[in-house]
Amino acid sequence: MLFQIRSPFPGMAAFSKGKFAVQDNRDFIDRAESAAEKLHGEPITTEEISKNFALYGVQKRAEALERFDTELCGEIDSSPHSLRRRVQLMALRKKMGTVHEALRKARR
């Protein structure tokens, strides 16, 4: 059984299975790429992430956007990789928000 526990570091989720706690400090894109690679053998693009997002129900999309917004509120450092990743995350969030609004207007 896997459950979320309080993490000593803000913005980092800690998960526990049995006796061991695992820190998952990857961002949304990293987690999606990892899951897709395990399932399909290759990482997923941000375009594919937004297409898959459209398949969620309205409640699941809203919850995903809330978690995504919480993740974006975390601190970033000024390294080039961190800034590029933040831009990618914000672009993906914008796409996902647009998809969610369009589907809500279509009552889906």
Image: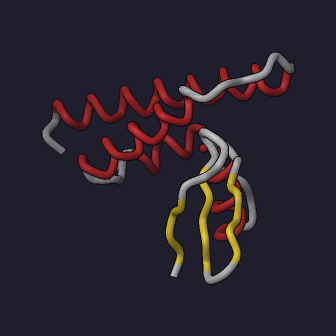
Please tell me which residue lies in front, 9 or 74. 9
Say if 39 sits above or below 68 in the image.
below
Between residues 33 and 65, which one lies in front from this camera angle? 65
The residue depicted at 20 percent of the width and 35 percent of the height is 104
Q: Please, which residue is most extreme toward the top here? A: 78
Residue closer to the observer: 77 or 53: 77
Q: Quadrant of the C terminus?
A: top left
Residue sitting at x 43%, y 33%: 96
Vertical relation: 15 (above or below) 27: below
- Judged from this view, the residue extending furthest toward the left is 107
Q: Is residue 91 left or right of residue 94?
A: right
Direction from residue 28 to residue 96 in the image, left or right:
left
Q: Residue at x 61, y 39 (%)?
A: 10
Residue 29 in the image: state x and y as whole percent: 64, 43
Image spot of residue 41 (x, y percent) = 74, 67
Residue 47: image quadrant is: top right
- The x, y position of residue 95, in whole percent, is 46, 28
Q: Is residue 46 above or below residue 83?
A: below
Residue 85 location, x and y as percent? 72, 28
Q: Quadrant of residue 76?
A: top right
Color theme of the render: secondary structure
Residue under the image location 39 percent in, 38 percent down: 66
Number of labels in the image equals: 0
